[in-house]
Image (cartoon, helix red, strand yellow):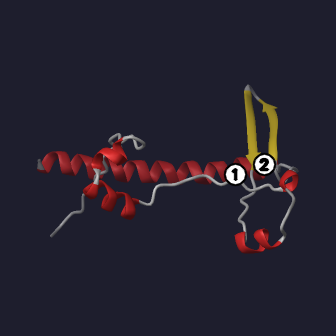
Amino acid sequence: MKELCQKFLEAKAKESAAKAERITIEADLISAVNPAKLEGTETRATDGFKIKITNKLNRSLDYDRYLSLDLPHQMQFVDHKPTINLKTLRVVEKVDPALVAQCVTVKPAKPSIKIEEVA
């Protein structure tokens, strides 16, 4: 087990170093291409490579202010997507698991692992 833990930590360190190097090279490529578009994709071809740089904008919504606009239906631009309230779901599952099973599908996620060296 000790050997596996050590290998895991070494692999994580290599992965972190490689990621940091990749991020630096990405920044250099973006600087070299110097895309003009604030949002969208620009493509450049050079020396046997095709480089695509996609710029995106993150948008946030002041939902109360949006509601205060009282927009007509055809001008409303916010989608409402239902999400599961996990705390309430667990309460309902304890009371009536069959009810929850009718509308919620449960699949296992990828397990995560964290190992720290201790002295």
Residue 114 seen from this side: no
Asked if residue 44 lies left or right of residue 110, the reply is right
Asked if residue 28 lies left or right of residue 39, the reply is left
Residue at the farthest top position: 48
Residue lying at 27% horizontally and 57% vertically, measured from the top left: 95
Residue 41: x %, y % from top left: 80, 41
Which residue is nearer to you in this view: 12 or 110? 110
Q: Residues within 10 Å of mark 1 (few under 14, many from 20)?
A: few
Q: Which residue is mark 1?
A: 28
Residue lying at 35% horizontally and 40% vertically, measured from the top left: 107
Residue 17 is labelled as none
Which amino acid lies under the numbered mark 2 shown in the image of this protein?
Ala
Residue 32 is labelled as 2
Q: In 3D space, how far apart are the residues under numbered discs 2 and 1 (Cα atoms)?
A: 6 Å
Q: Are marks 2 and 1 in contact (CB under 8 Å)?
A: yes
* Image quadrant where residue 92 sits: bottom left
Which residue is nearer to you in this view: 9 or 90? 90
Residue 116: x %, y % from top left: 24, 62
Q: Residues within 10 Å of mark 2 (few under 14, many from 20)?
A: few
Residue lying at 37% horizontally and 64% vertically, measured from the top left: 87
Which amino acid lies under the numbered mark 1 shown in the image of this protein?
Asp
Residue 39: x %, y % from top left: 81, 50
Quadrant including the C terminus: bottom left
